[in-house]
Image (tube, grey):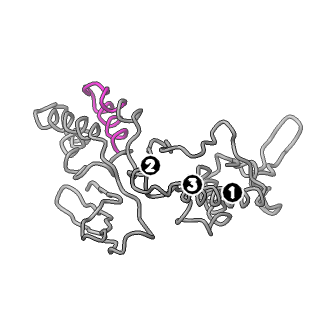
Amino acid sequence: MGGYYERELDISTRPLTTFETQLGRLQLTRLPQGATSSVEFYQAQMTWILHEEIPEHLGIFIYDGGIKGPRSTLKENLLMRRFFLEYAVTLERILFRIEEAGLTISGSKFACCVPALDIVGHVVSLDGRKISKQKINKIQNCPRQTTKKEVREFLGLCAYVRMFIKDFSQVVAPLRRLTREDVFWNWVEKCEKAFIKLRKIVGEEIALKTLNYEKWSGKIKLAIDSSYISAGAVLMQEDGNGDQYYMNQYPFPN
Protein backbone atom coordinates (compact mmCIF):
# COMPACT_ATOMS: atom_id res chain seq x y z
CA MET A 1 0.00 0.00 0.00
CA GLY A 2 0.95 3.65 -0.30
CA GLY A 3 4.25 4.64 1.25
CA TYR A 4 5.37 7.22 3.76
CA TYR A 5 5.31 10.11 1.29
CA GLU A 6 1.54 9.80 0.91
CA ARG A 7 1.12 10.91 4.53
CA GLU A 8 1.15 14.71 4.80
CA LEU A 9 2.93 16.29 7.78
CA ASP A 10 1.08 18.73 9.99
CA ILE A 11 2.28 22.31 9.46
CA SER A 12 3.32 22.63 13.11
CA THR A 13 5.75 19.69 12.83
CA ARG A 14 7.41 20.62 9.54
CA PRO A 15 10.07 22.88 11.14
CA LEU A 16 11.48 19.74 12.81
CA THR A 17 12.46 18.44 9.36
CA THR A 18 14.37 21.58 8.29
CA PHE A 19 17.59 20.96 6.37
CA GLU A 20 20.17 23.23 4.69
CA THR A 21 20.56 23.42 0.89
CA GLN A 22 22.19 25.73 -1.65
CA LEU A 23 18.77 27.30 -2.15
CA GLY A 24 18.37 27.97 1.56
CA ARG A 25 16.54 26.11 4.30
CA LEU A 26 13.82 23.71 3.22
CA GLN A 27 11.26 21.65 5.11
CA LEU A 28 9.62 18.32 4.36
CA THR A 29 5.88 18.32 3.80
CA ARG A 30 5.49 14.53 3.81
CA LEU A 31 6.30 11.84 6.37
CA PRO A 32 10.05 11.02 6.10
CA GLN A 33 10.88 7.34 5.93
CA GLY A 34 14.00 7.58 8.08
CA ALA A 35 12.55 9.47 11.05
CA THR A 36 12.60 7.75 14.44
CA SER A 37 8.82 7.62 14.90
CA SER A 38 7.82 7.24 11.22
CA VAL A 39 7.26 3.46 11.37
CA GLU A 40 5.17 3.71 14.54
CA PHE A 41 3.10 6.56 13.12
CA TYR A 42 2.55 4.87 9.77
CA GLN A 43 1.55 1.57 11.40
CA ALA A 44 -0.94 3.45 13.59
CA GLN A 45 -2.37 5.24 10.55
CA MET A 46 -2.86 2.01 8.60
CA THR A 47 -4.41 0.31 11.62
CA TRP A 48 -6.83 3.21 12.09
CA ILE A 49 -7.85 3.29 8.41
CA LEU A 50 -8.51 -0.46 8.28
CA HIS A 51 -9.39 -1.13 11.93
CA GLU A 52 -12.84 -2.50 11.08
CA GLU A 53 -11.21 -5.31 9.08
CA ILE A 54 -8.53 -6.21 11.66
CA PRO A 55 -7.97 -8.97 12.75
CA GLU A 56 -10.86 -11.03 11.32
CA HIS A 57 -10.24 -10.28 7.65
CA LEU A 58 -6.92 -8.47 7.39
CA GLY A 59 -3.42 -8.46 8.87
CA ILE A 60 -1.27 -5.31 8.61
CA PHE A 61 2.51 -4.97 8.94
CA ILE A 62 3.43 -1.33 8.28
CA TYR A 63 2.52 -0.99 4.56
CA ASP A 64 2.12 -4.71 3.81
CA GLY A 65 -1.30 -6.28 4.19
CA GLY A 66 -2.67 -9.79 3.80
CA ILE A 67 -6.38 -10.43 3.28
CA LYS A 68 -7.35 -13.72 4.89
CA GLY A 69 -9.01 -16.39 2.80
CA PRO A 70 -11.31 -19.25 3.89
CA ARG A 71 -10.06 -21.76 6.47
CA SER A 72 -10.99 -24.72 4.31
CA THR A 73 -9.96 -26.25 0.98
CA LEU A 74 -11.93 -27.61 -1.96
CA LYS A 75 -11.47 -31.18 -0.71
CA GLU A 76 -12.97 -30.24 2.66
CA ASN A 77 -15.88 -28.21 1.35
CA LEU A 78 -17.54 -28.65 -2.04
CA LEU A 79 -19.25 -25.27 -1.64
CA MET A 80 -15.97 -23.47 -2.36
CA ARG A 81 -17.77 -21.08 -4.72
CA ARG A 82 -19.60 -19.58 -1.75
CA PHE A 83 -16.33 -19.01 0.11
CA PHE A 84 -14.78 -17.50 -3.02
CA LEU A 85 -17.69 -15.06 -3.25
CA GLU A 86 -17.25 -14.11 0.41
CA TYR A 87 -13.54 -13.50 -0.21
CA ALA A 88 -14.31 -11.36 -3.27
CA VAL A 89 -16.75 -9.25 -1.26
CA THR A 90 -14.16 -8.79 1.51
CA LEU A 91 -11.50 -7.86 -1.05
CA GLU A 92 -13.77 -5.28 -2.68
CA ARG A 93 -14.66 -3.75 0.70
CA ILE A 94 -11.02 -3.43 1.78
CA LEU A 95 -9.98 -1.94 -1.57
CA PHE A 96 -12.79 0.60 -1.21
CA ARG A 97 -11.51 1.63 2.24
CA ILE A 98 -8.00 2.03 0.83
CA GLU A 99 -9.30 4.16 -2.04
CA GLU A 100 -11.38 6.33 0.31
CA ALA A 101 -8.28 6.99 2.43
CA GLY A 102 -6.39 8.22 -0.64
CA LEU A 103 -3.84 5.40 -0.59
CA THR A 104 -2.44 3.53 -3.58
CA ILE A 105 -1.42 -0.10 -4.10
CA SER A 106 1.69 -1.23 -5.94
CA GLY A 107 0.51 -3.20 -8.97
CA SER A 108 3.76 -5.16 -9.24
CA LYS A 109 3.49 -6.32 -5.62
CA PHE A 110 -0.25 -6.99 -5.59
CA ALA A 111 -1.22 -10.68 -5.53
CA CYS A 112 -4.80 -11.93 -5.47
CA CYS A 113 -6.22 -15.38 -4.64
CA VAL A 114 -2.88 -17.06 -4.00
CA PRO A 115 -2.39 -20.05 -1.63
CA ALA A 116 0.54 -18.41 0.22
CA LEU A 117 2.24 -15.03 0.67
CA ASP A 118 5.84 -14.19 1.58
CA ILE A 119 5.74 -11.28 4.03
CA VAL A 120 9.10 -10.08 5.40
CA GLY A 121 10.60 -13.57 5.39
CA HIS A 122 7.51 -15.40 6.67
CA VAL A 123 5.34 -17.51 4.38
CA VAL A 124 1.69 -17.16 5.42
CA SER A 125 -0.81 -19.77 4.25
CA LEU A 126 -3.70 -21.97 5.40
CA ASP A 127 -1.20 -23.96 7.49
CA GLY A 128 -0.11 -20.86 9.42
CA ARG A 129 3.26 -19.10 9.34
CA LYS A 130 6.47 -20.75 8.15
CA ILE A 131 10.02 -19.60 7.51
CA SER A 132 10.59 -18.65 3.87
CA LYS A 133 12.80 -20.91 1.74
CA GLN A 134 15.22 -18.03 1.24
CA LYS A 135 15.76 -17.66 5.00
CA ILE A 136 16.11 -21.42 5.46
CA ASN A 137 18.74 -21.70 2.73
CA LYS A 138 20.66 -18.72 4.09
CA ILE A 139 20.94 -20.32 7.55
CA GLN A 140 21.63 -23.86 6.32
CA ASN A 141 24.32 -22.68 3.89
CA CYS A 142 26.02 -20.53 6.49
CA PRO A 143 29.63 -21.76 6.99
CA ARG A 144 31.03 -22.69 10.39
CA GLN A 145 32.10 -19.59 12.31
CA THR A 146 35.75 -18.88 13.10
CA THR A 147 35.50 -15.53 14.93
CA LYS A 148 33.27 -13.88 17.52
CA LYS A 149 32.03 -11.44 14.89
CA GLU A 150 30.89 -14.29 12.65
CA VAL A 151 29.07 -15.94 15.58
CA ARG A 152 27.23 -12.68 16.30
CA GLU A 153 26.20 -12.42 12.65
CA PHE A 154 24.97 -16.03 12.63
CA LEU A 155 23.00 -15.54 15.86
CA GLY A 156 21.49 -12.37 14.45
CA LEU A 157 20.32 -14.31 11.41
CA CYS A 158 18.87 -17.09 13.58
CA ALA A 159 17.19 -14.62 15.94
CA TYR A 160 14.95 -13.58 13.06
CA VAL A 161 13.34 -17.04 13.11
CA ARG A 162 13.68 -17.79 16.82
CA MET A 163 9.91 -17.82 17.35
CA PHE A 164 9.80 -21.05 15.30
CA ILE A 165 12.50 -22.85 17.32
CA LYS A 166 11.56 -24.54 20.58
CA ASP A 167 13.96 -23.76 23.47
CA PHE A 168 15.87 -21.38 21.20
CA SER A 169 17.77 -19.66 24.01
CA GLN A 170 18.98 -22.98 25.44
CA VAL A 171 20.02 -24.27 22.01
CA VAL A 172 22.13 -21.19 21.21
CA ALA A 173 23.56 -20.80 24.75
CA PRO A 174 27.00 -22.32 23.86
CA LEU A 175 27.29 -20.04 20.82
CA ARG A 176 26.11 -16.97 22.69
CA ARG A 177 28.72 -17.60 25.38
CA LEU A 178 31.43 -17.37 22.72
CA THR A 179 30.45 -13.76 21.98
CA ARG A 180 31.23 -12.56 25.52
CA GLU A 181 34.26 -10.31 25.89
CA ASP A 182 35.54 -12.20 28.95
CA VAL A 183 35.53 -15.59 27.15
CA PHE A 184 38.44 -16.77 24.98
CA TRP A 185 37.64 -18.22 21.58
CA ASN A 186 37.28 -21.99 21.80
CA TRP A 187 34.97 -23.84 19.42
CA VAL A 188 34.19 -26.92 21.52
CA GLU A 189 31.86 -29.87 20.92
CA LYS A 190 28.90 -28.05 22.52
CA CYS A 191 29.28 -25.23 20.00
CA GLU A 192 29.43 -27.68 17.10
CA LYS A 193 26.28 -29.50 18.28
CA ALA A 194 24.40 -26.20 18.71
CA PHE A 195 25.44 -25.07 15.23
CA ILE A 196 24.33 -28.34 13.60
CA LYS A 197 21.07 -28.48 15.58
CA LEU A 198 20.09 -24.95 14.59
CA ARG A 199 20.57 -25.65 10.90
CA LYS A 200 18.61 -28.90 11.22
CA ILE A 201 15.64 -27.41 13.12
CA VAL A 202 15.28 -24.54 10.67
CA GLY A 203 14.88 -27.02 7.80
CA GLU A 204 11.95 -28.81 9.47
CA GLU A 205 9.50 -26.16 8.21
CA ILE A 206 7.74 -25.68 11.53
CA ALA A 207 4.41 -23.85 11.23
CA LEU A 208 2.89 -21.48 13.77
CA LYS A 209 -0.90 -21.33 13.67
CA THR A 210 -2.81 -18.05 13.65
CA LEU A 211 -5.45 -17.15 16.20
CA ASN A 212 -8.85 -18.41 15.08
CA TYR A 213 -11.63 -16.05 16.11
CA GLU A 214 -14.46 -18.06 14.60
CA LYS A 215 -14.03 -21.83 14.47
CA TRP A 216 -12.39 -22.69 17.78
CA SER A 217 -13.98 -22.12 21.15
CA GLY A 218 -10.87 -23.15 23.07
CA LYS A 219 -8.99 -20.91 25.45
CA ILE A 220 -5.97 -18.80 24.55
CA LYS A 221 -3.07 -19.57 26.89
CA LEU A 222 0.18 -17.80 27.69
CA ALA A 223 2.79 -20.08 29.31
CA ILE A 224 5.86 -18.47 30.91
CA ASP A 225 8.99 -20.16 32.27
CA SER A 226 12.58 -19.28 33.14
CA SER A 227 15.92 -20.85 34.04
CA TYR A 228 19.45 -19.73 34.84
CA ILE A 229 20.11 -19.64 31.07
CA SER A 230 17.03 -17.90 29.71
CA ALA A 231 13.39 -16.94 30.07
CA GLY A 232 10.59 -17.49 27.58
CA ALA A 233 6.89 -17.45 26.83
CA VAL A 234 4.60 -19.41 24.50
CA LEU A 235 1.22 -18.27 23.17
CA MET A 236 -1.15 -21.18 22.51
CA GLN A 237 -4.77 -21.83 21.60
CA GLU A 238 -6.92 -24.92 22.18
CA ASP A 239 -9.21 -26.37 19.55
CA GLY A 240 -12.54 -28.07 20.18
CA ASN A 241 -10.79 -31.37 20.98
CA GLY A 242 -8.53 -29.88 23.63
CA ASP A 243 -5.40 -30.02 21.45
CA GLN A 244 -3.05 -27.06 21.78
CA TYR A 245 -1.48 -25.19 18.87
CA TYR A 246 1.46 -22.81 19.09
CA MET A 247 0.76 -19.25 17.94
CA ASN A 248 4.10 -17.74 18.90
CA GLN A 249 7.20 -18.31 21.03
CA TYR A 250 9.18 -15.60 22.79
CA PRO A 251 12.67 -16.66 23.95
CA PHE A 252 14.64 -14.14 26.03
CA PRO A 253 18.32 -14.92 26.76
CA ASN A 254 19.63 -13.87 30.16
For label 1, count other residues whose C-alpha is less than 10 Å away and answer few (under 14), some (14-19) or many (20+). Answer: few
Q: Earlier in the sequence, mark 2 or mark 3?
A: 3
Query: Residue 144 lies in magenta, yes or no?
Result: yes
Residue for badge 2: 125
Q: Earlier in the sequence, mark 1 or mark 2?
A: 1
For label 2, count other residues whose C-alpha is less than 10 Å away and answer few (under 14), some (14-19) or many (20+). Answer: some
Dot 2 amino acid type: Ser
| Distance between the alpha carbons at the discs numbered 1 and 2 | 21 Å
Residue 53 image-quadrant placement: bottom right
Residue 110 image-quadrant placement: top right
Q: Earlier in the sequence, mark 3 or mark 1?
A: 3
Horizontal and vertical percent position of residue 135? 39, 35
Horizontal and vertical percent position of residue 49? 68, 64
Question: What's the magenta region?
Answer: 138-159
Depth check, front residue: 143 or 53: 53
Question: 169 left or right of 60?
Answer: left
Dot 3 amino acid type: Phe
Depth check, front residue: 193 or 104: 104
Depth check, front residue: 160 or 25: 160
Question: 100 left or right of 149?
Answer: right
Residue for badge 3: 84
**Circles 1 and 2 in contact, beta carbons < 8 Å:** no
| Distance between the alpha carbons at the discs numbered 3 and 1 | 12 Å
Depth check, front residue: 44 or 218: 218
Q: Residue at x 53, y 56 (%)?
A: 68
Res. 92 mark:
1
